[in-house]
Amino acid sequence: MVVLDPDAQALVEAAKAAGAKTFREIGIEGVRSRMESLPPARTPEMAEVADLVFDGPHGTVPVRLYRPHPGGGPAIVYLHGGGMIMGTLDSFDGLARNLAASCAAVVLSVEYRLAPEHRYPVASDEAYAAVAWAHAHAAALGIDPGRIAVAGDSAGGALAAGAALRSRDENGPPIAVQMLFYPGLERAVDRPSMIEFADGPVLTRPDVIWMKEQYLGPDEAADTEYGVPALARDLSNLPDAIVVTAEVDPLRDAAEEYGRRLREAAVPTALLRYPGVCHGFLSQAARLRRARVAFTEIGALARAKFEELT
């Protein structure tokens, strides 16, 4: 029997007391409003924060730069979570700051277009374009073009994995490391974790089905490996990986299977499961001690990867 971390239990109980509903029950506008109305938490100070834009394949794309300390160095192109239907630079500001501070790297947080207004391949195209833009403008951004990683949580993890696949296939810009935090790499396949945590907490199986359809559409036969990375047959020659999962998460088993497949394809992969916490736990670093521990460990791994490339 899974036992929730005490901090996670407190958050789950607070949500229940507030009458929390599933994402699907609330609907598109409801979940967007709820996410953007969450109170900001205390987060690390940055040496520089700047709002930028780049010209993407579907129009201009906002990017927020977080520089944890003066000077240049490695960078992380970060793609936020939110099931492809919600999330902004503001609502994931805390996670981006914690990532920058823990990894001692510039973070470029990307506000890609959301579904259902913009379905596949729009966000996937913009994720890949953001990596290419970071490389092409490395000097102006004050970052090392040889040490640019891609990262994402939840839906953003799928975008990050898809960008890594596409960069390999198209001989695109080199990616130092792919950092996949409880990524949503497939539709709601009935793996054990999808069954055990079908009713949550935090994320439910119906939520996964609904949000995937908003972006990918209902026809699974039209899915590609860039939109659904678990479909990729060949995972060789991909960037080194850091795959983070939450024990109490329907997406856990698919993410861990992807990590194992990366290892089998001879891709150096750190696979980290955090016990007792739920999907999205890194966004709760101010309230979850285990999330703070995770950032410390993720940061140490990322800094070691970047150090190898100096």
Image (cartoon, helix red, strand yellow):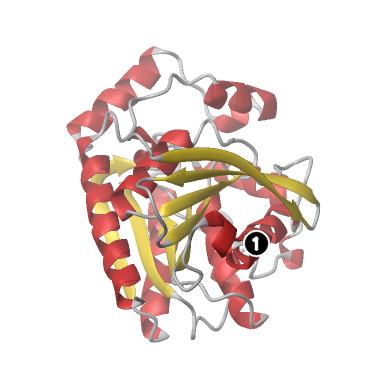
Say left or right for 238 vs 302.
Answer: right
Please name the residue shown 32% across and 35% down the image.
44
| 45 sits to left or right of 176 | left
* Image x and y of residue 181, in percent: 41, 54
Q: Quadrant of the N terminus?
A: top left
Q: Nearer the viewer, residue 308 or 180?
A: 308
Q: Position of residue 153 (x, y in %)?
A: 46, 50
Write the residue at 45% across / 43% down: 198
Q: Label 1, secondary structure: give it.
A: helix
Identify which residue is drawn at 81% across, 52% down. 58
Task: Give the image location of residue 192, x and y in percent.
Answer: 39, 57
What's the amino acid at mark 1? Trp
Label 1 crowd (10 A; few <14 / some 14-19 / many >=20): some
Look at mark 1 in the image and give the residue it sits on: 133
Q: Is residue 260 above or below residue 123?
A: below
Q: Residue at x 56, y 45 (%)?
A: 208
Q: In the rendered view, does 27 fall on the left or right side of 206?
A: right
Q: Looking at this view, is 176 or 200 the one in front?
A: 176
Q: Is residue 251 visible?
A: no
User: Based on the displayed image, in which of its 4 quarters is residue 131 positioned?
Assistant: bottom right
Left or right side of 152 for 68: left
Kindly tell me whether residue 33 is visible in this rendering.
Answer: yes
The foreground one among 41 and 277 is: 41
Residue 241 to residue 296: above or below: below
Tell me residue 307's x, y (percent): 29, 71
User: For the C terminus, which image quadrant?
Assistant: bottom left
Q: Is residue 284 above or below residue 246?
A: above
